[in-house]
Structure formats: structure tokens, C-alpha cells
Image (cartoon, rainbow, N blue to C red):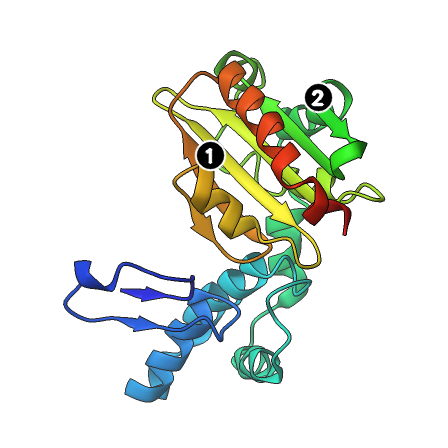
Amino acid sequence: MIDHHINPDLTAYDFSFSTTETSSTSELIFDMMAELNPQLINKTISECIYVGIMTDTGSFSYSCNSEKTFRIVAELFKNGIDGVKIHKLIYDTFSESRLRLLGYCLSDKLVVLPEYHTAYIWLTMEELDRFNYKTGDTEGVVNYALGIKGIKFAALFTEKEDKIRISFRSTDNFEANTFAGNHFEGGGHKNAAGGDSFITIKETLEKFEILLNDYKDDLSG
């Protein structure tokens, strides 16, 4: 198990390489490969590691306050990767249906709760089907809700066949991972976490809004 999240289940594995002092699991993979045999890290592997670090840090906007992360990225560039091309392929190469889904999320499915400094977006399976949803099409959508001025906590609720998948984002000292762990069987980073709900999406949204009242002081601070 190679992981950089808080409180991983170490008992489930024979070997583990785990620390929260890194930007991403990809950075840990770099560390491990560099220790075993630096020659393993060729251009192709450098591209993969760069993608992992870039996406897990929101294009280096969070979880990357260590100079070590940027030293590793510099080593990846020495191997000939094209950072501009990689960024464009991941963030600026959308299908028409994905772009229309994003527009629908913002125009029709965004709920703002200013009294809780919270915003969320929710999508049903029917809505996802309408926009020919493919895995990854909702990646980053929750960040638009968090980008609203005055919002400290954001969530994206996505209906699946057997559960409601939830992505949480927060700012400042509000712990998204603690909220996810306490109420939605989840976890992750302090400001970026995930969880699951096994009731209907309507019941999940109602539960979420009720819970916010317990955190009103934390969100207002």
C-alpha cells in the first residue's frame, strides 16, 4: 500500500509506504522508484508521475507547500516532459457533452447556502445519462462551487446505482475529511475529501443541510 492520506488501514497490507507529508501518492511513488533505481524513471513514467502530482494538487494550488514537490517536478522536466501539453490534454480537452454537463451543473444544479458559507451541486443518474456521462466528466466540478466568494465548504453529490458518491472541498481550517469521516463513511485530506451515502439522494441532501447547522460556528469563523 502506497498512500498519503490520513489514517490509512495499515492492517490490511503486508507492506506499506505511507506519510501525509507529501503532495500526492505519485510523489511517494517517485520517492520509492528513486530509492530503488533512479534509472527506472524514464520520460513515460515521468509523464505519469507529473499527471498524478498535478491533478492531486489542483494544478499546484493546494497540498504542495513543500519545496520538495517542486524539486521532484523539476527532475521530471529534466526527463523531457511537456507540461503545457499535459495540462492541455487533462484540463482543456473536453467533449461537447462534458462541457454542457458543466454548464447544466452551474445553471440548474448549484445550491448556495450563504448562512452556512456552503454551496453544493447534485446530479441524478438520469441527468448523467442525459449528458452521456463518462468517468471523469465531473472531475473538478465541486471546485466551481468552492470558488464562489464567501464559500468555505462545497460538495458534489453524484447518484450511482448503489450509493451516492460525494466529493467535499473546503478552505481555511474547516476539515472536510473529518466531516466526511463522521457522517459519510469517508475521509481524505483536510480540504479535499470524499464519502458515500446509502440512502436516496433526496434524503442525503436533507441530511447534509441538517448537519450544516451543527457546523455553523466553524463555517462562520
Q: x%, y% of residue 177?
A: 51, 51
Residue displayed at 57% across by 22% down: 205
In the displayed structure image, the side of residue 152 where residue 26 appears, left or right:
left
Question: Pointer 2: residues within 10 angstroms few (<14), some, or many (20+)?
Answer: some
Asked if the residues shown at circle 1 and circle 2 are in contact, with their CB atoms under 8 angstroms apart, the answer is: no
Q: Earlier in the sequence, mark 1 or mark 2?
A: 2
Residue displayed at 45% across by 70% down: 20
Up the image or down, 200 lies above or below 6; here it is above
Whether residue 127 is visible to the viewer of this picture, yes or no, is: yes
Quadrant (top left/top right/bottom left/bottom right) for the N terminus: bottom left
Task: Report which residue position mark 1 lands on.
Answer: 135
Q: x%, y% of residue 51?
A: 52, 61
Residue displayed at 60% across by 55% down: 191
Distance between mark 1 and mark 2 Cα atoms: 17 Å
In the displayed structure image, the side of residue 50 where residue 41 appears, left or right:
left
Residue displayed at 64% across by 53% down: 174
